[in-house]
Amino acid sequence: MKELFRLRIAGKRQITVPQRLMNVLDIDEGDELQVTVEDKRIVNAVPCRSVPAHLVSPEVAAAIEESRREIKANEAGDEHELARRIREASRSTSAQTIGSPTQARSKQKAGAGSY
């Protein structure tokens, strides 16, 4: 089902997100939206959450930092290639389960630093 939401850009480029949209996307204060833009139009917006730094393995952290450097240097491939690299780094380490999204959010708020 499609829903239309209207967002207002306030001072300091802050955007107010209606509570209904936050509920639909299952996001909370502090979460982020990754937005894809093509031809001056938003074509995709995906909710994403930060992961506390203490839950990220050194290999995954290194892959993320390398991707950031490549993006800044404008040498990175498309977003699918970057996601693939991070998945590969994740597979090379043992996976950790952090529980439900609610538990993950409460752990995130308690942790320092994030990726």
Image: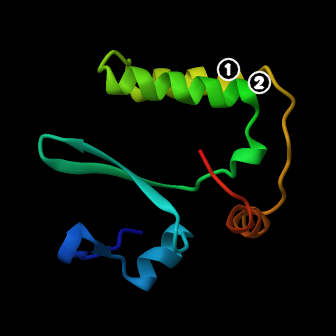
Image coords of residue 73 (percent x, y) = 32, 20
Q: Quadrant of the C terminus?
A: top right
Q: Is residue 10 left or right of residue 97?
A: left
Measuring 74% from the left and 70% from the top, which residue is drawn there? 106
Compared with residue 20, is residue 1 higher up or lower down, i.e. above or below? above
**In terms of image quadrants, where is residue 91?**
top right
**In terms of image quadrants, where is residue 8?**
bottom left
Q: Is residue 87 left or right of residue 40?
A: right
Q: In the rendered image, is residue 4 in sight?
A: no
Compared with residue 106, is residue 78 higher up or lower down, i.e. above or below? above
Q: Which residue is mark 2?
A: 91
Q: Viewer-proximal residue, 88 or 21?
A: 88
| Residue with the most extreme left position | 40
Measuring 54% from the left and 28% from the top, which residue is drawn there? 65
Q: Which residue is mark 1?
A: 88
Image coords of residue 23 (percent x, y) = 52, 78
User: Which mark, by number, is residue 3?
Assistant: none
Compared with residue 66, is residue 10 higher up or lower down, i.e. above or below? below
Task: Give the Cα separation between the discs numbered 2 and 1.
Answer: 5 Å
Measuring 58% from the left and 20% from the top, which residue is drawn there? 85
Q: Viewer-proximal residue, 18 or 30?
A: 30
Q: Secondary structure at mark 1?
A: helix
Q: Amino acid at mark 1?
A: Glu
Image coords of residue 11 (percent x, y) = 19, 76
Q: Quadrant of the N terminus?
A: bottom left
